[in-house]
Image: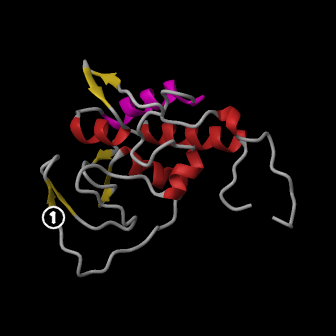
Amino acid sequence: MAGEYTRKQIRENREMWIAFLRTPGLKKQVGVLEVGEARCCLGHGCVALGVPETGKRAASVKPYVNSSAKVRVVATKYGNISPEYTYAPKELMQAVGLHFNTGALAGGGNFQFAGRCFTSLSELNDKSDATPAQIADILEAHIEGGLRSFFVPLSHYPEEIADDATH
């Protein structure tokens, strides 16, 4: 079935995203998934996993200023622009098992980076000086998933998917 992943596939996808974030020279973007070669942590995840374009915006869409990040936000090939934070496309959420499209923790609450509290990966990316490699370290600490994690527990996914053409 489309959109279904095994436990092994989810873990491998998470590991690929983490490894990609550790690529030297990655450019960080705030307020949007991608502008040129600069991307937020979720945008880098899209590239790492080959997430297809999820809806192009018409050329008539005008850039606007993101009031929280004070950056010029433009339409991207992923088509996910937010006035507050960036959102992961559904395909990325499924491929890595994110609980929420902003990368918020399941069960609410927050996590700390550099002595400050954050509620989501989008907020961490947009409102801190965290590098992609530092975000990778945070993701790696949550790789098993669960409550108070960005990720659905690996145990939620099947060991294998039955090859049943009737689905």
- The percent coordinates of residue 89 (x first, y second) are 46, 57
Which residue is more in the foreground, 143 or 156? 156
- How packed mark 1 is, by other alpha carbons closer than 10 Å (few <14, some 14-19, many 20 or more), is few
Quarter of image, res 108: top left
Quadrant of the rendering where the C terminus is positioned:
bottom right
Q: Can you say whether 63 is above or below 88 in the image?
A: below
Residue at left 32%, top 51%?
Answer: 86
Q: Magenta region's main secondary structure? A: helix
Residue at left 53%, top 28%?
Answer: 147
Residue 43 visible here: yes
Which residue is more in the foreground, 66 or 129? 66
- The percent coordinates of residue 82 (x first, y second) are 28, 57
Residue at left 54%, top 52%?
Answer: 49
Q: Can you say whether 129 is above or below 36 in the image?
A: above
Residue at left 52%, top 50%?
Answer: 93
As drawn, the residue found furthest toward the top would be: 115
- Kind of residue at badge 1: Tyr
Q: Is residue 150 left or right of residue 134?
A: right
Residue 142 inside the magenta-drawn segment: yes
Residue 17 inside the magenta-drawn segment: no
- The percent coordinates of residue 38 (x first, y second) are 30, 52
Residue 37 visible here: no
Instruction: Tell me the residue that label 1 is attached to.
Output: 64
Which residue is more in the foreground, 36 or 69? 69
Q: Can you say whether 88 is above or below 104 in the image?
A: below
Quadrant of the rendering where the N terminus is positioned:
bottom right
Q: Is residue 85 left or right of residue 97?
A: left
The coloring applied to the image is secondary structure
- The percent coordinates of residue 53 (x first, y second) are 46, 68
Span highlighted in magenta in the image: 131-145
